Image (cartoon, coloured by chain):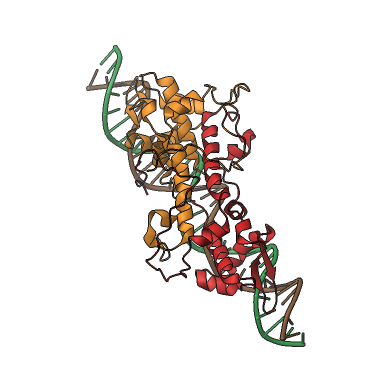
Chain colours: A red, B orange, C green, D brown
Amino acid sequence: MKLSTRTRDGMRALLDIARHGGGAPVRLRDIASRQEVSLSYLEHIIGPLIAGRILRSTRGSGGGISLLREPDRILLSEIVSLLEGPLATVDCVLHADVCPRSVSCATRGLWMEMAEAMDSVLGSRTLADLMKTDDGAEAGSCAPTALRPQRSPVTGAASARGNGDMERQ
Amino acid sequence: MKLSTRTRDGMRALLDIARHGGGAPVRLRDIASRQEVSLSYLEHIIGPLIAGRILRSTRGSGGGISLLREPDRILLSEIVSLLEGPLATVDCVLHADVCPRSVSCATRGLWMEMAEAMDSVLGSRTLADLMKTDDGAEAGSCAPTALRPQRSPVTGAASARGNGDMERQ
DNA sequence: TTATTCTTGACTAAATTGGTCAACATACTC
DNA sequence: GAGTATGTTGACCAATTTAGTCAAGAATAA
């Protein structure tokens, strides 16, 4: 149940662009170096975001990558969707026909709710929201300062019970 | 972002046991056949659930598997935790030290909230709840009847408004 | 024209997942 | 006890997915 590293790194890359852009294109090389990923790897992360019309690229000298929309118009769910694909945790959520049980299966309803819960978090936040909680520390600089303010209007909830999911692995 | 098939199949197996048990042990062979998974595969799914004290096994003739607690005492979050491991979608959620940015990283807060959102769904429901929405159809029997109660529409999309709002952890 | 930058696709290594098989342990029945 | 019915465990493997590199190319600016 891990997100791919592309999603993880891609989200940071977007945050990087939003913070360093200010209108002007940001060079992939610079993002890569700040976020400590290889350039060729970053290229593959950026690709889908351009195709998904979240980013725009400019080639040639002075070129780079910039946001195609204001950060407060970019939903985090869009980003994850482009980098990770649908949040469906099992196939039958999206394609009921992969399993003859789909119509009546109680677990399917559960998995759908899980997907909705995740989407509810991601769909109610924009890149701008994320920027607010970002204190701007660069990779490796590890400022031991600000712990995030508590957000969570949507999820307000956590488990009804402190369960032990720290076990295993 | 898929759950493992073990989690998916394990959840169904538990539902199967809850429905067919009635106190008496249910044979793995029967569960396997009803749920259309191989016996040897099912054994590996059941293992962690026994270790996690959700199930109890009885060997020998007349033996099988039974629930160690009443279904309404079995949280779905326990089940997923045993079969899938922690819901953390990226490593740093559980182990801040894998990344020097952890303390200040805005994305980490986001991933934590996603995990909480999932846990909120799973932690507020028991196996008994799941049984209620299960119309009892066997594998393959695909009864085109009962659509589960409410439970919003398809696909992981939309639903800006949350779900199981529970108290905080 | 040249340097700079993004773009794309082929490719590979490693990790993970899904699943089988076989040996074993335990319990019941006669 | 013997024999059979059940669950338990670990070794193992094939397939897939993921993470990441490399190299050729295309667009732009100076």
Q: Is residue A70 above or below residue C19?
A: below
Residue positioned 51% across, 25% down in the render: B133
Relative to the observer, which residue lies in front, D30 or B12? D30
User: Is B166 or B97 nearer to us in this picture?
Assistant: B166
**Residue A123 appears in the rendering:** yes
Between B158 and A72, the residue placed more toward the observer is A72
Q: Position of residue B86 (x, y in %)?
A: 41, 46
Q: Residue at x 59, y 51 (%)?
A: A77
Q: Where residue B41 sits in the image (x, y, percent)?
A: 45, 36
Residue B28, by quadrant, is top left
Q: Is residue B2 above or below residue B51?
A: below
- Relative to A128, does residue B42 appear above or below in the rendering? above
Q: Is residue A1 visible?
A: no
Q: Residue at x 61, y 74 (%)?
A: A27
Number of numbered tags placed on the structure image: 0
In x, y percent, where is residue D25? 74, 72
Who's the residue at 51% across and 61% down the image? A132
